[in-house]
Image (cartoon, rainbow, N blue to C red):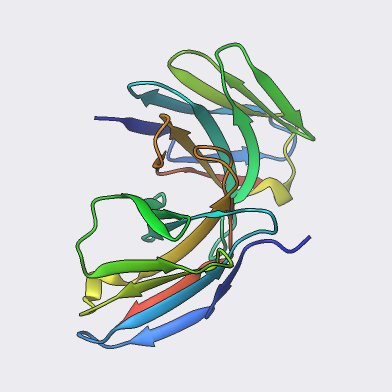
């Protein structure tokens, strides 16, 4: 049973650039959530996608946007990167609203 | 505002020394409380889901319990391989899950 996968594993960008991160959910899951985790902190909710629609957004600016495809995979896009966007970006999938989420290995983004 | 607080921030134990981690929450309504284990640089690994006060779940050396205001993760006779950050999270019925900052556990042989 394939778990949640994310790509790439690591990414280095410079300020002002744009980045796209990708996620494939666990088999049988249709809901994808994205989180940002800074060093030493818990994951912070960015947004959740279901049926290709954004259902809820956390306290993140419009520079953060996403997309979900018909096969339930998802992308996270961040525009105009800032140094403070450096973090581990986590994707989690679930099958029901509020049900247990399973996480991928994360993408480590470094902004120089 | 919904909030999740974990304590202690860090815990150092000797191998075999049992202890408990605390997760207190202030939320408008609890749909589910989740415990995860996270190793450095990796994604959180699911441990338990608890839905109602009085519920308990066990897995190997770990046992999670839930009351109306807090949850405990009890670690019995820990081993060095139990060293990790343990995260608590709550869902209040919406689409958003709120995480605590975690407890870093160090178990020395």
Residue B94 drawn above or below residue A66? above
Q: Is residue B6 left or right of residue B75?
A: left
User: Which residue is found at the position 69% from the left and 46% from the top?
Assistant: B82
Disc count in the image?
0
**Quarter of the picture holding the C terminus of chain A:** bottom left
Q: Position of residue A39 (x, y in %)?
A: 39, 61
Q: Is residue A100 left or right of residue A50?
A: right
Residue A47 in sight = no
Residue B64 in sight = yes
**Quarter of the picture holding the N terminus of chain A:** bottom right
Q: Position of residue B10 (x, y in %)?
A: 47, 42
Residue B72 drawn above or below residue B36? above
Task: Say which of A13 and A48 sits in front.
Answer: A48
Q: Position of residue A13 (x, y in %)?
A: 33, 87
User: Which residue is found at the position 64% from the left and 16% from the top?
Assistant: B55
Quadrant in the rendering for residue A66: bottom left
Task: Say which of B98 and A77 sits in front.
Answer: A77
User: Which residue is found at the position 53% from the left and 66% from the top?
Assistant: B41
Residue A97 drawn above or below residue A22? above
Q: Position of residue A78 (x, y in %)?
A: 30, 74
Residue A4 drawn above or below residue A30? below
């Amino acid at each position: 049973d394939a778990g949640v996968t994310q790509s790439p594993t690591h990414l280095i960008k410079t300020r002002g650039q744009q980045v796209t991160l990708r996620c494939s959910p666990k088999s049988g899951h249709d809901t994808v959530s994205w989180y940002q985790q800074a060093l030493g902190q818990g994951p912070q909710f960015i947004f959740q996608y279901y049926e290709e629609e954004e259902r809820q957004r956390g306290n993140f600016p419009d520079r953060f946007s996403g997309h979900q495809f018909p096969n339930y995979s998802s992308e996270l896009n961040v525009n105009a990167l800032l140094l403070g966007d450096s973090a581990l970006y986590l994707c989690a999938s679930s099958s029901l609203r509020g049900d247990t989420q399973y996480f991928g290995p994360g993408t480590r983004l470094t902004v120089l | 505002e919904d909030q999740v607080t974990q304590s202690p921030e860090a815990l150092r134990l000797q191998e075999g020394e049992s202890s408990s981690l605390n997760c207190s929450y202030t939320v408008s309504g609890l749909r589910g409380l989740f415990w995860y284990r996270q190793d450095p640089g990796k994604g959180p690994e699911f441990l338990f889901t608890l839905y109602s006060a009085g519920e308990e779940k066990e897995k190997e050396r770990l046992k999670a319990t839930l009351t109306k205001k807090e949850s405990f993760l009890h670690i019995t006779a820990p081993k060095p391989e139990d060293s990790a950050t343990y995260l608590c999270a709550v869902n209040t019925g919406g689409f958003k899950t709120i995480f605590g900052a975690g407890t870093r556990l160090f178990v020395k042989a």
